[in-house]
């Protein structure tokens, strides 16, 4: 069974080198395991690090990018498949459909938008695909704390933590992904099915 991991990450060019290194490690790791990459289609930033590393290691790379971002994010035209969409919504839909699992590396507003959409889909029982948040060097600590605050303030019932897996780095990602992409051992969503 073909396994494709959708990676959400940054396209910025002025980030700390450690974020590009994490992207490189993720891309290589996917290829070494024979898992395909589905991502935002750019060759710049962490996006580029993931895609170029996966391709260099012999992995399959599928990029999905909106037409108005082809030049802005420097579309990776050497991808095995480059899908150009008419909108960001279409981009996200195709990435979701092509994925067996989702991984969010540190990123900006675009990464957060993608992360929240997939998280909500899981919480509303619209899919059961694994979602892993890579909390590199505590990057997402404040976001995690905010999600917990939503529960404390009763904007959200408890159980959100069961809808995704949080790992401290790329090295810790692999056992979780391998286990969760095996449908026979996949952890079922057991939280409150209603967002409130």
Image (cartoon, rainbow, N blue to C red):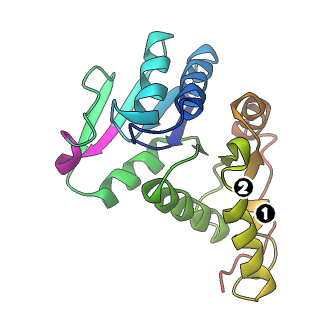
Q: Secondary structure at mark 2?
A: loop
The relative height of residue 77 versus residue 150 in the rendered view (above or below) is above
Helix, strand or loop for disc 1: helix
Which image quarter: residue 183?
top right
Structural distance between the alpha carbons of marks 2 and 1: 6 Å
Q: Toward which corner of the image does residue 77 lie, by quadrant?
A: top left
Q: Mark 2 touching mark 1, by CB under 8 A?
A: yes
The percent coordinates of residue 131 (x first, y second) are 65, 50
Q: Residue at horizontal 33%, vertical 21%?
A: 80
Say which quadrant the C terminus sits in.
bottom right
Q: Which residue is mark 2?
A: 164
**Is residue 176 in view from this perspective?**
yes
Apparent side of residue 62 relative to residue 123 in the rendered image (left or right): left
Q: Which residue is the site of mark 1?
A: 161
Q: Which residues are magenta?
A: 64-71
Instruction: Give the crowd class for mark 2: few <14, some 14-19, many >=20 residues within 10 Å.
Output: many
The quadrant in which the N terminus is found is top right
Q: Callout 1: 10 Å neighbours few (<14), some, many (20+)?
A: few
Question: Percent from the top left, x then y, of residue 116?
Answer: 55, 64
115 and 59: which is toward the camera: 115
Give the residue at x 33% y 60%.
Answer: 89
């Amino acid at each position: 069974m073909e396994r494709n991991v959708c990676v959400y990450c940054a396209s910025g060019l002025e980030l700390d080198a450690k974020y590009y290194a994490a992207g490189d490690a993720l891309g290589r790791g996917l290829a070494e395991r024979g898992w395909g990459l589905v991502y935002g289609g750019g060759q710049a930033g962490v996006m580029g690090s993931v895609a170029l590393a996966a391709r260099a290691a012999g992995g399959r790379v599928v990029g999905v990018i909106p037409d108005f971002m082809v030049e802005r994010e420097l579309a990776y035209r050497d991808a095995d498949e480059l899908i150009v969409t008419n909108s960001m919504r279409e981009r996200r839909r195709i990435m979701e459909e092509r994925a067996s699992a989702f991984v969010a590396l540190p990123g900006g507003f675009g990464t957060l938008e993608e992360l929240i959409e997939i998280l909500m889909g899981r919480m509303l029982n619209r899919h059961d695909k694994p979602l892993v948040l890579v909390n590199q060097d505590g990057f997402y600590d404040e976001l995690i704390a905010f999600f917990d605050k939503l529960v404390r303030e009763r904007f959200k019932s408890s159980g959100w933590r069961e809808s995704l897996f949080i790992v401290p780095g790329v090295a810790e990602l692999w056992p979780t992904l391998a286990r969760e992409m095996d449908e026979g051992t996949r952890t079922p969503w057991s939280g409150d099915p209603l967002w409130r």
